[in-house]
Amino acid sequence: MEISILGAGAMGSLFGGLLAEAGHDVTLVDIDDAHLDAIHRDGLRLVTDAGERVVKNLRACRPEQAAHAPELLIVFTKTMHTEAALAVARALLGAQTAVLSLQNGLGNVERLERSVPRARIMVGMTTWPADKPGPGRVDSHGAGAIRLMSADGDVGAASASLARTVNALNAAGLHCTADPDVWSAIWEKVAFNAALNSLCAVTQCTVGELSNLPDGETLALKIVAEVAAVARAHGVAVNEAHIRETVLHALAHHRTHRPSMLQDVLAGRKTEIEAINGAVVAAARTVPMAVPCTETLLHLVRLVEVRSPQ
Ligand code: NAD
């Protein structure tokens, strides 16, 4: 399959590298010149549980250099960069190009829909983790999976591309299933991230440090309960007990982990707070219902972001 990845940071490079290894025709598209230069010079260094290797059978370019529309475009920028990236990389959007977002947060379909008809959009959730320790290299350890569906409900023209996409991702070892209940998975991850990402970003605590006092756990579980209630009010069946278990497991076992929002704050970058807590607050207002903890964390992260230049 001819596949382009728009936003080839940690996740985009992991997916691009694994898809290229599986024999797909992959182009990474990004604005990080140091990363692109390293890939042009040495190839993409992939470090996973399967070992360390260099993937050389892929292309890498900047969005303005992308000249060819692929069969599948995977968007893996951070959520707040989706629209700017697509505006420059318009040549990637052909009349038949299917577009997939596995980005975190809510609103990804709506952001893509400003450039692509809904019938050609696929949306999902992935539990694969990835880090980019430096230019040209991506690390991913532990198992993950992908659940996805067509944004229009898995019917119509998109279902053929859905099946081809699921097959391509499975051939790359990414454990993908088509799942009409994907919105439950998306909201459950939003609840987890709304709690732990925002609390760690504001306190600058690791996940473990957050659990050193009962306040961390209490606040995290309050946010989980608020987000789960908003999801249910919007007709999405989330398993709140499962989200609570996942949060408690992270607090107990992922002690040194710095969630991406904390990493962004420490690096002076904008965070994905608007697509996570911000989108939950917006969804709560339409019910209407109050989400005081989620909303307070939204305001606090915005205040912390005032010091972030990018
Ligand atoms: P990242 O910051 O490592 O990668 C994003 C990439 O987008 C960067 O390389 C950046 O240069 C690029 N970019 C920014 N603006 C661009 C533009 N205008 N045109 C082209 N490229 C542009 O982020 P990530 O960790 O790979 O996360 C990507 C998405 O996946 C996020 O929504 C995140 O929440 C989600 N996610 C991440 C993980 C993880 O473990 N890292 C896991 C699941 C989901």
Image: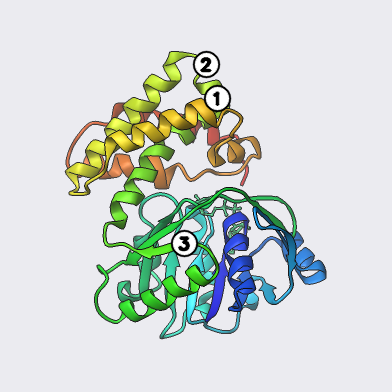
SS of the residue at dot 1?
helix
Q: Residue at x 29, y 50 (%)?
A: 184
> Quick check: can you spot residue 280?
yes
Mark 1 = which residue?
208
Spatial CA span between label 1 and label 3:
29 Å
Q: Earlier along the polypeptide chain: callout 1 or callout 3?
A: 3
Q: How far apart are marks 3 and 2 (CA)?
A: 35 Å
Which of labels 1 and 3 is toward the front? 3
For the residues labelled 1 and 2, say whether their Cβ atoms are less than 8 Å apart.
yes
Amino acid type shown at disc 3: His
What residue is drawn where x is 29% and y is 34%?
241
Left or right of 125 on screen, residue 255:
right
Q: What element carries label 2?
A: loop
Residue furthest toward the right?
41
- Image position, residue 286 (x, y; %): 20, 44
Local packing at callout 3 (Cα closer than 10 Å; few below 14, some 14-19, many 20+) is some
The x and y percentages for residue 259 are 55, 37
Circles 1 and 3: CB distance less than 8 Å? no
Disc 3 designates what residue? 175
Per the model, the C-alpha gap separating discs 1 and 2 is 7 Å
| Quadrant hosting residue 13 | bottom right
Q: As shown in the figure, which amino acid type bears the numbered disc 1?
A: Gly
Q: Residue at x 55, y 44 (%)?
A: 270
Q: Residue 172 versus residue 184: which sits nearer the camera?
A: 172
Image position, residue 60 (x, y; %) = 68, 72
Q: Do the residues labelled 3 and 2 touch (CB within 8 Å)?
A: no
Residue found 29% across the figure and 43% down from its top:
282
Give the residue type at disc 2. Asn
Q: Tell me, for residue 212, which label it has, or none.
A: 2
